[in-house]
Image (cartoon, rainbow, N blue to C red):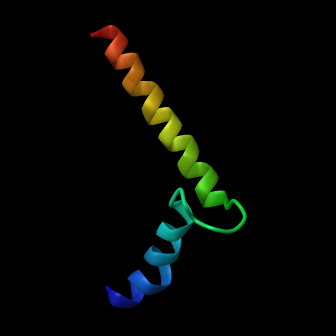
Amino acid sequence: MTRTYARALRPGLAEIMPTAPGPPSKLRSHFDRLHAAIDQRVQEVRLAA
């Protein structure tokens, strides 16, 4: 698990953090779209309730 974390998970998680420095990454843009879709769905459910 330590190698997996160090080589895959840690760098990927660093890319999707809102305060991540550097240029926008493809992973970050996909994560932002996912976050927006979740927020939209939550709003739709609240309106239906």
Residue found at x 59% / y 50%: 30
Q: Is residue 27 above or below residue 13?
A: above
Residue found at x 52% / y 76%: 11
Residue found at x 55% / y 61%: 19
Q: Residue furthest left?
A: 49
Q: Is residue 31 above or below residue 4?
A: above
Q: Residue furthest bottom?
A: 3
Say which of 7 and 15 sits in front.
15
Say which of 46 and 19 sits in front.
19
Q: Quadrant of residue 15?
A: bottom right
Q: Is residue 3 above or below residue 24?
A: below
Say which of 37 and 18 sits in front.
18
> In the rendered image, which quarter contains the C terminus?
top left
> In the rendered image, which quarter contains the N terminus?
bottom left
Q: Is residue 42 left or right of residue 29?
A: left
Residue found at x 40% / y 21%: 43
Give the percent coordinates (x, y) of residue 10: 45, 76
Give the percent coordinates (x, y) of residue 27: 60, 59
Q: Is residue 33 left or right of residue 43?
A: right
